[in-house]
Image (cartoon, rainbow, N blue to C red):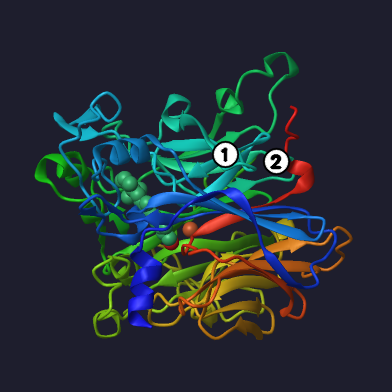
């Protein structure tokens, strides 16, 4: 089990760019036509050099194509500049989150990109290993730097490199954009090089461009929606996602921060980007709500205790309150756990999360009695979450929805609206995803799916074409096996009952991935276009 774990996490995986027909068992819905496209790290050793952290691995895209009851599997490494330079040098020559590499022989590409305090930072990596973004009719592999890479979702080929920084002043971005019903993309990034003006920027990428500009990309029409100044100019918060309701943008400024001075000197000091992140458990976490129409921030100061979180689940408005669910931790042991030296055969002794992922619901009153006394709880909805008036603002404490879930997904048609269900991977005190779950946030009841030797990935909900209820549809998850004799499979569950409809097995060594999306057939450009 333990060495299997090491192989799953850090063994280099082969790519399978030619479609492999999967063996389908059970009954897949006939309407399920399209591509499940996912991303994650697949290679952690290049020549004799090894990455330190699981999040450093080279992006390996993989896909399951559903066509007339048949399923085809493909996988292909993202041909990023990072990949190409590393492979050419046969060693790691580009720095990643947890690995600083230098000197860089690929000087022409990874030359020093910007200066700060007269030191230099090398250009960031384009190893986009975290998620998939849809902008206009195009798909991109994404990470958290200023670069994204266009890909062909059918062949998994790597196309253009897009630098967000050409269109908006951001140096780091999230891999969890939002989409409105028209397909416009909203994302956030932080501007860290404009000294003294460190800020978080929300921007919009329109879904379509004017007819006469059809040849141009929608990035040329990117607009800044609003920006939020960082509380600390030299220590902006790290964030992995943000929230969106019908009328508000939700930004949580957690005391898990990037240290800009450390970043500016990391390269010359030979330390990693990861070492420039620090959690201050004695600080507060600040909530920011920006009105999407007026672009003004709600002036009341809302805060909660120090925490570290990565994923927003969903957010919505109800009776003058903003309600948002997140998966949070009381410390940053999650990032530390993913150092590959910890994910080895002695892992059971070495690695224990000191904080368990907890699904928390914050209920924040935007309209409240301004004369309410200090100490009074301003939440008027039926929830155990509180928002207590203090002299310096409003102190919020969450309702706990459940413990031990990560990689949350919802029916995205309910994004920004009141949702009832959350689909997620289950993990307890270690990075072992043994089950997936469906949580009913109203009753807190959970349904589970798990199997012997099975590690399921982030579950993705796909609505059925005639869906009436929130959970009318299927849940898709890739299942890797801890028993090397057993083949991985794509599992299709009925989202209502959380029972198996069918599975598509492929005899490959599949990697553990992070995030992805289901692309319905009608969203795919036809080959002739
Ligand atoms: C390279 C690089 C970064 C990369 C961060 C990554 C790759 C984060 C991955 C996070 C994940 C996968 C979280 C899951 O919950 C930073 C720190 C943004 C900034 C400096 C350069
Ligand atoms: Fe994520």
Q: Is mark 1 within 8 Å of ligand 1?
A: no
Quadrant including the N terminus = bottom left
Towards the viewer: 423 or 435 = 435
Quadrant including the C terminus = top right
Label 1 packing within 10 angstroms: few (<14), some (14-19), many (20+): some
Name the residue rendered at 48%, 80% in the picture.
Answer: 404
Judge from the rendering whether residue 147 lies leftward or rightward of residue 37; answer left or right.
left
Q: Compared to 201, does 452 lie above or below? A: below
Towards the viewer: 340 or 11 = 11
Report the residue marked by disc 2.
183
Q: Compared to 478, does 17 lie above or below? A: above
Residue located farthest toward the left when viewing the structure as drawn: 269
Towards the viewer: 122 or 478 = 478
Report the residue marked by disc 1.
295
- Say how many tags the image has: 2
Contact? badges 2 and 1 (CB < 8 Å): no
How far apart, in angstroms, are the residues tagged by discs 2 and 1?
Answer: 21 Å
Q: Is residue 304 visible?
A: yes
Nearest to viewer (mark 2 / mark 1):
2
State which tag comes first along the sequence, 2 or 1. Answer: 2
Judge from the rendering whether residue 439 lies leftward or rightward of residue 520; answer left or right.
left
Where disc 2 sits, the SS reads loop
């Amino acid at each position: 089990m333990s060495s299997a774990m090491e192989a799953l996490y850090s063994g280099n995986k082969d790519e399978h760019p030619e479609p492999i027909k999967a063996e389908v068992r059970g009954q897949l819905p006939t309407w399920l036509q399209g591509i499940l496209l996912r991303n994650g790290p697949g290679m952690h050793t290049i020549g004799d050099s090894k990455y330190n952290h699981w999040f450093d691995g080279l992006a390996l895209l993989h896909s399951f194509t559903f066509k007339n009851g048949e399923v085809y599997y493909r996988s292909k490494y993202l041909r990023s500049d990072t990949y190409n330079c590393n492979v050419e040098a046969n060693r790691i020559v580009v720095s990643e989150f947890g690995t600083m590499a230098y000197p860089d022989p690929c000087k022409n590409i990874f030359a020093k990109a910007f200066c700060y305090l007269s030191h230099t930072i090398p250009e960031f990596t384009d190893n986009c290993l975290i998620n998939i973004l849809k902008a206009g009719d195009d798909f991109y592999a994404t990470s958290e730097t200023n670069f994204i890479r266009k890909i062909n979702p059918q062949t998994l080929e790597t196309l253009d490199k897009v630098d967000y920084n050409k269109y908006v002043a951001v140096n780091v971005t999230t891999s969890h954009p939002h989409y409105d019903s028209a397909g416009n993309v909203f994302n956030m990034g932080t501007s860290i090089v404009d000294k003294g003006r460190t800020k978080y920027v929300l921007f919009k990428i329109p879904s379509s461009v004017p007819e006469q500009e059809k040849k141009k990309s929608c990035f040329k029409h990117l607009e800044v929606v609003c920006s939020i100044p960082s509380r600390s100019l030299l220590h902006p918060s790290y964030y992995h996602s943000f929230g969106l309701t019908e009328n508000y943008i939700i930004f949580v400024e957690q005391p898990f921060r990037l240290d800009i001075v450390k970043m500016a000197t990391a390269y010359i000091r030979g330390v990693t980007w990861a070492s420039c992140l620090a959690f201050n458990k004695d600080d507060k976490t600040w909530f920011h709500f920006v009105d999407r129409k007026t672009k003004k921030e709600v002036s009341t100061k809302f805060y909660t205790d120090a925490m570290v979180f990565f994923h927003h689940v969903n957010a919505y408005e109800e009776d003058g309150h903003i309600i948002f669910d997140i998966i949070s931790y009381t410390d940053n042991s999650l990032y530390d756990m993913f150092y590959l030296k910890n994910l080895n055969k002695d892992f059971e002794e070495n690695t224990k999360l000191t904080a368990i992922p907890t699904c928390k619901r914050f209920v924040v009153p935007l309209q409240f009695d301004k004369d309410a006394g200090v100490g009074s709880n301003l939440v008027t909805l039926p929830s155990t979450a509180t928002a207590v008036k203090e002299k310096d603002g409003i102190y919020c404490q969450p309702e706990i929805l459940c413990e031990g879930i990560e990689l949350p997904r919802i029916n995205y048609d309910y994004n920004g609206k009141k949702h009832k269900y959350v689909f997620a991977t289950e993990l307890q005190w270690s990075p072992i995803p043994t089950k997936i779950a469906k949580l009913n946030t109203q009753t807190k009841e959970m349904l589970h799916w798990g199997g012997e030797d099975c590690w399921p990935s982030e579950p993705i909900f796909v609505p059925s074409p005639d869906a009436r209820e929130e959970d009318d549809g299927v849940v898709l998850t890739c299942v890797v096996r801890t028993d090397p004799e057993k083949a991985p499979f794509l599992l299709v569950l009925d989202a209502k009952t959380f029972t198996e409809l069918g599975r598509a097995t492929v005899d490959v060594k599949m990697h553990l991935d992070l995030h992805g999306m289901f692309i319905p057939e009608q969203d795919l450009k036809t080959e002739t276009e």
